[in-house]
Structure formats: C-alpha cells, structure tokens
Image: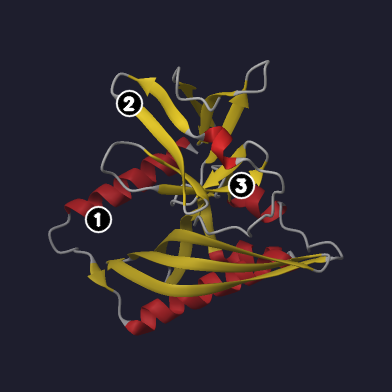
Amino acid sequence: MQKFLLASALAWLAILQAPTLHATEAPNALRNQLVAITQAWVDALPLGRQDVWQRTLADGAVLIDEFGRIQHKQDAVASLHPLPSGLSGSIELRNPHVQQYGDAALLQVEWYERESVFGQQLVVRYQSLLTFVKQNGAWKLVGAEDVTIPTAPPTLQVDGLMLGDYSGSYRYGPDRAWTVSVKDGVLGYVTKAGRSFNRIEPIARDVFMGTDDERNLLIFRRDAAGHVSELIERRKFNDLHLKREAGSAKA
C-alpha cells in the first residue's frame, strides 16, 4: 500500500510539473469511452458482477464512498454480490466532464441513482470524481470518490405543532445569536440582523430540518417545566448548542 501511494504521488507530481502536460477538455471520443467504462462499472453493482470490477479497476485502486469508507481493489471486488430479492437499483450518469492530463484523466459526473426497496421508490444523487490512467493501451480506474448531493426530502405532516413555542433569541457566543420566528406560517431563523430568513421544515415535535444545502437538523430542547430552553444544530455529526436567552421564551 505504501509503495502504491508513493508511486501515485510521484506520478501526479510528474504530471503537475511537466511543462507540456496541461489540463485540457478531453475529446468527445475519450469522454464517451470513460463514461462507458464507468457506466459498466456502476451497472455491475446491483448484479454483483465481480468480473467487471476486476477488469475495470487498476491494481491498487482506492475507492472512497459517500460515508468516507475506504476500499482497495481486492476488498471492493470481493464485496460485490447481487442485491437480494425485493431490492433493485440503477445509476444514470449525468452531465459528465473530462479533463485530460496526458495518460491520466479526471471524470466529474453526477450519479442519479434510483432504488426500489420492496416497492418503495427512492432517488439519491451523488457528485463523483473518478481518476483514470492509461496502462498498456487501456484506461483503468485508479481512484473514485463521491459525495451525496443534498436534495429536498418529502414533506412530513406533523400535527399539533405550536410554532410560537420556538420563537426567541438563541445565543452561542458573543455577538452570535439566532433569532427564531414565524413568518407567513413558517418557522425559520435569521443568523444576523439584515440577513435572509432561513426556513426550516418539521420532522417531528421539536425536530426540524434546514432547507439550505447542508440540510442540518434543528432540535429544540425543553426544560423540566416543558418550556423550550435550547436549540441544537446537529451538523456533520456534531452538535452546536444555542441557549435561549432570558426573556425571549414564550410565556
């Protein structure tokens, strides 16, 4: 593994330093070829086609999924199995862009994944970056990383919400406070005077989700008397605590 990482680092250093190798938009023929390789690679996932991954991946390839899990070729190939009965899925590649660096190329592409889970239909979108190198006349995948694109989830109907319970000022530092209020029947917050109103959507009593790109959870905590006393923004597996300021709680 260390030898592979060193070799990869040296290869990319050579690419970056070589005066004649510049990033150029790849010709259509190369773009189409890399897209076809990638499409076959992702099509092999639900079928458990280990032979496709064995053929497509370069030895020592590194794959990082949307959860930050790392696999190398041997483990990745061995992990492939057909989806069990009741589960199915497909991935459509959208809006591909390829930059070529001599015998190396970067493919940036959206994965539009459709999943069927015992009749329930799910859609997940990913932004993916794949690195290819040309070995013995064939393009091989040496690295792949993808992240989930935040998208608006289905709206949930939460009965009995008293949005006024949450209105108030919530502070987490000097000159750092959110003002939570109800605007046109919708709960939201402003991070600073003059800034835009950030609408949030209910998931359950005292639990909301942001509508921005990060889609963080907003959790209102109550004291022993049942009054809202704190707001927690749960983001990237961490909690930011904002204490409700005295006098801003609803009587």
Contact between marks 2 and 3 (CB within 8 A): the answer is no
Report x, y in % for residue 8. Answer: 37, 47
Left or right of 124, for residue 194: left
- Seen in the picture, residue 53 relative to 228 is either above or below; the reply is below
Rounded to the nearest angstrom, the CA distance separating label 1 from label 2 is: 46 Å
Q: Position of residue 213 (x, y in %)?
A: 44, 52
Task: Give the vertical position of 208 relative to 156 (above or below).
Answer: above
Of the numbered discs 2 and 3, the one sitting upstream in the chain is 2
Circle 2 SS class: strand
For badge 3, the amino acid type reads Pro
User: Which residue in the protein does label 3 denote?
Assistant: 202
Residue type, label 2: Arg
Q: Residue at x 58, y 31 (%)?
A: 220
| Amino acid of disc 1 | Ile
Mark 3 surroundings: few (<14), some (14-19) or many (≥20) residues within 10 A: many
Frontmost residue, 24 versus 214:
214
Please report the residue visible at 53 percent of the width from the left and 66 percent of the height from the top. 111
**Mark 1 sits on what residue?**
15
Q: Which residue is mark 2?
A: 176
